[in-house]
Image: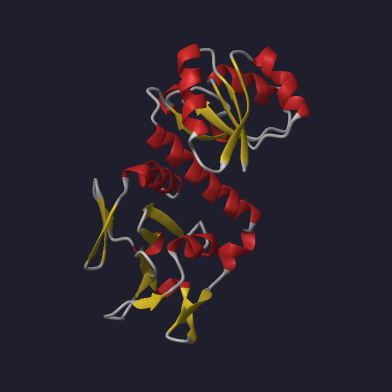
Amino acid sequence: MRKIVIIHDDTKELQLLQDYLAITPGVSLAGSFSNIDHAKPKLTEAHCDILMADLSVLTALVKEKKELPLLVCIGKESDMQASTIHKNIFSYLQAPFSHERIFSLIQNINAYMKMVSNPSDTKREYIFIKSEYKLIKINLSDILFLSGLRDYTQVFLKGKLSPLTTLQNLKDFESKLPASAFIRVHRSYIISLAQVDYISRNEITIGTNTIPIGHAYRQLLDDMITKNS
């Protein structure tokens, strides 16, 4: 469970963020404040994983050189161009807020934290998949994408006409595949970033396959592309 602290001086927007986070799985609100002075005791006494705040607040905290959680700036990325703390910001949250955007942001943060806490995942070269009473070794470099159905997952591989079918669910694969190389782009699809040919507005093309992009996962994909561009 990721603990979040929010510091934002707009009362209505602060309430909206609280409401959206309350219905977002995997996170809990450790505190919400309208100014930095009220928030400092909470930041000092309680551990939090994510701090969402205005640029001025983040600038002040970074200047104090304290150990800080993951920082999310409430505002436009364009406003950060003249700021010296740009490199400290993980992501940006621009009004008007939506639950879709909040959900996508938390997904992105979870993927990043998973990668940081499990650096060995980036070195993994293969996984074993249960299929037809066998454990089959699959090289990660051969995986094009995965398609999750109700009770099973199909793994599409380079050079194979038919996908490999397994009773493992898509969420299980999401937890095992390295977050630096694979990304969930739809509730039913995980793709290998290395295999993408091109991305259009609402879909991804890998070879002759077209994979839809779910609205809730669009920002996560955009953020990942930005970090690798």
Residue 79 is situated, as x and y percent measured from the top left of the image, at 44, 22
Spot the residue most to the front: 151
Task: Please identify the quarter of the rendering in which residue 207 is found.
Answer: bottom left
Image quadrant of residue 197?
A: bottom left
- Front residue of 29/195: it is 29
Q: Can residue 74 be seen at all in this image of the molecule?
A: no
- Whether residue 156 is situated above or below residue 110 in the rendered picture: below
Q: Residue furthest right?
A: 45
Say which residue appears at 37% left-offset and 78% top-offset: 164
Q: Residue at x 74, y 30 (%)?
A: 46
Res. 211 in view: yes
Q: Residue at x 40, y 71 (%)?
A: 143
Q: Residue at x 39, y 70 (%)?
A: 152
Location of residue 55 in the rendering, given as x and y in whole percent from the top left corner: 54, 21
Q: Nearer the viewer, residue 69 or 229?
A: 69
| Side of 49 relative to 100 (left or right) | right
On the rendered structure, is 84 left or right of 174?
A: right
Which image quadrant: the N terminus?
top right
Q: In terms of depth relative to the viewer, which is nearer, 196 or 109? A: 109
Vertical comparison of 129 with 95: above or below: below
